[in-house]
Amino acid sequence: MSIKHALIFLFIFSSKTLIAAELINLTTNEVNNKLTQDALVIDIRTPAEWQRTGIIPGSHPVKFFDKNGKFDADKWLATVKQLQSSPDQAIILVCQSGRRSGRVGHYLTDKLDMSNVSHLQNGISSWIKEKRPTETSCAPTQTC
């Protein structure tokens, strides 16, 4: 076998590892369908936002950014890993408009090479606009 053929063979059978993880944009219908498929839905907004609008039923409120836009990725990831039922469980990120969840999703896929990460495009505002259900959520230090 020539070197050219060997390189083509090697590329074909190792191309899966060469493909970078990619953030997936989901519609409200797609998120709703994935809720029944054991996806882990993480609402990355602030406690004030969770109280104002509620959260998607079954989702987990885990704030990513502080009020100054700073974040502790290691601490946040440790919390997410505790919530995951398996390392390859699908993760769906939710914020108010889709902007922050897109940024966090790209951070996870581009910088940390995590796969199976998606986010609700247009955020919970699109969920609420379609009159989908929400539930009350409180920060761990608050009483509801």
Image (cartoon, helix red, strand yellow):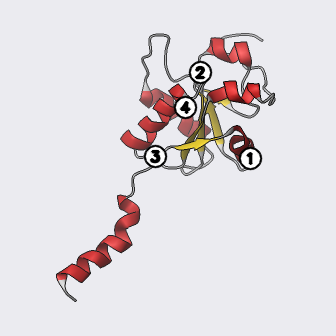
- Three-letter amino acid code at disc 2? Arg
Q: Secondary structure at mark 4?
A: helix
Q: CA distance from mark 3 to mark 2?
A: 21 Å
Image quadrant holding the N terminus, namely: bottom left
Evaluate if marks 4 and 2 touch, with contact meaning CB atoms under 8 Å apart.
no
Q: CA distance from mark 1 to mark 4?
A: 24 Å
Instruction: Please name which of the two marks, 2 or 1, marks the residue nearer to the observer.
Output: 1
Q: CA distance from mark 3 to mark 4?
A: 15 Å
Tell me if I can see residue 79 in this picture: yes
| Quadrant hosting residue 94 | top right
| Quadrant hosting residue 126 | top right
**Residue at 31% of width from left, 78% of height from top?**
9
Pointer 4 local density, CA inside 10 Å: few below 14, some 14–19, many at least 20: few
Tag 1 residue: 33
- Three-letter amino acid code at disc 4? Thr
Evaluate if marks 3 and 2 touch, with contact meaning CB atoms under 8 Å apart.
no
Tag 3 residue: 114
Instruction: Please name which of the two marks, 4 or 2, marks the residue nearer to the observer.
Output: 2
Sequence-earlier tag: 1 or 4: 1
Tag 2 residue: 45
Sequence-earlier tag: 3 or 1: 1
Image quadrant holding the C terminus, namely: top right
Tag 4 residue: 79
- Three-letter amino acid code at disc 1? Asn
Q: Nearer the viewer, residue 66 or 94?
A: 94
Q: Position of residue 129 (x, y in %)?
A: 75, 25
Q: Position of residue 21 (x, y in %)?
A: 44, 50
Q: Position of residue 99 (x, y in %)?
A: 52, 27
